[in-house]
Image: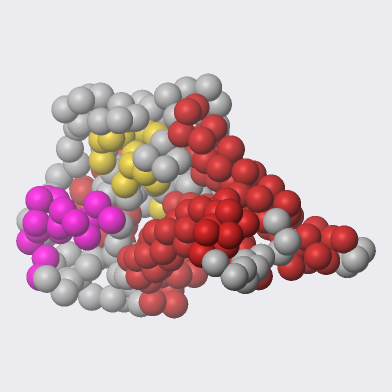
Amino acid sequence: MFKNVFGSGFLVRTAHIVLTWVVTLILFLHDTDLRRQEETGALVQPVLFVLLVLLSVLLYFAVSLMDPGFVLSDDDNGAKQVTQGVGEVHQDMISQSESPRQRRCSHCLLQQPMRAKHCHTCQHCIRRYDHHCPWIENCVGERNHRWFVLYLGIQLLALLWGLYIAWSGFSPTPTWDLWLRGNGLLLAAASLVAVVSVVVMLLLGSHLYLVSHNTTTWEFMSRPRISYLKHCGAEQNPFDRGTLANLWGFFCSWGVVVWERVYFREPGNFSLAAPPSNLALPHPKPLF
């Protein structure tokens, strides 16, 4: 389920954790609301802030080390479930619709489930591939996408709270030279937090938008080159089931989703009809 902690992303993860706790320490050492409350014995805000930062760190490690949905073989549980489903769907549907056939990856030579893509960095095909994120040094795919979005939300809360705390620590001085001497370190920390906050906010907003339409970053950016989407109209998405259903399925539905069932729901008709009730299936249970 998890990758090697000391893999290729070790330096990236180490830098992230070090910066996180260095900024947190600066907020505690300067004369901010956090330190003032700590000194007066009001520990509720300091404890909650540290717990929020700790939660963001744990989620970062979980998303970074989690299996994003590797297709390891044609016969492993997840891949077997999907490819079996594809075979049966194709037998029933392929004669009625000029739909793209299942393809074999030219790099790892494995049969790709629909919406999967080969990542040249991870050297694996990833189910429901979204993108490879250098921040976590891991792909974002079917297994960890929801946790990635949750991490972004928690991280944004911690960053905005940290920015507010940093602002409370700036003290006025008679001259700019004295102000920079007294607040330079806090200013640097606040500037870093502000920049990262903007990046995380944009990432979170874009992912929530894509999730609400049941599409991925790869599908959104490369739509004309994707075989199962390039023949659809500009506004057509065969996986879109409506905003609420998309969000519910993304955050609350667990297990392997056989996207071929959604895609071939009605041959030649990409309507937004509701998916079958057995669309999402638990990993250990065979589909057929």
Check the image and name the residue furthest to the right. 41
Camera-side residue: 65 or 27?
27
The image position of residue 283, as x and y in percent, is 52, 43
The image position of residue 163, as x and y in percent, is 57, 65
Residue at the image position 15 percent from the left and 57 percent from the top: 223
Query: What is the image's colouring?
Result: secondary structure
Vertical order, 166 against 126 (above or below): below
Residue 41, visible in the rendered structure: yes
The image position of residue 27, as x and y in percent, is 67, 56
Residue at the image position 41 percent from the left and 64 percent from the top: 198
The image position of residue 230, as x and y in percent, is 9, 58
Residue 220: in magenta span = yes
> In the image, 203: left or right of 167?
left
Vertical order, 133 against 94 (above or below): above
Which quarter shows the N terminus? Answer: top right
> In the image, 104: left or right of 39?
left
Which quarter shows the C terminus? Answer: top left
Camera-side residue: 200 or 259?
200
Residue at the image position 26 percent from the left and 41 percent from the top: 117
Question: How many numbered circles does the render carry?
Answer: 0
Check the image and name the residue furthest to the front. 174
Residue 232: in magenta span = yes
Residue 152, visible in the rendered structure: no
**Highlighted magenta segment, given as a residue range:** 217-233
Camera-side residue: 121 or 41?
41
> In the image, 178: left or right of 54?
left
Residue at the image position 73 percent from the left and 52 percent from the top: 29
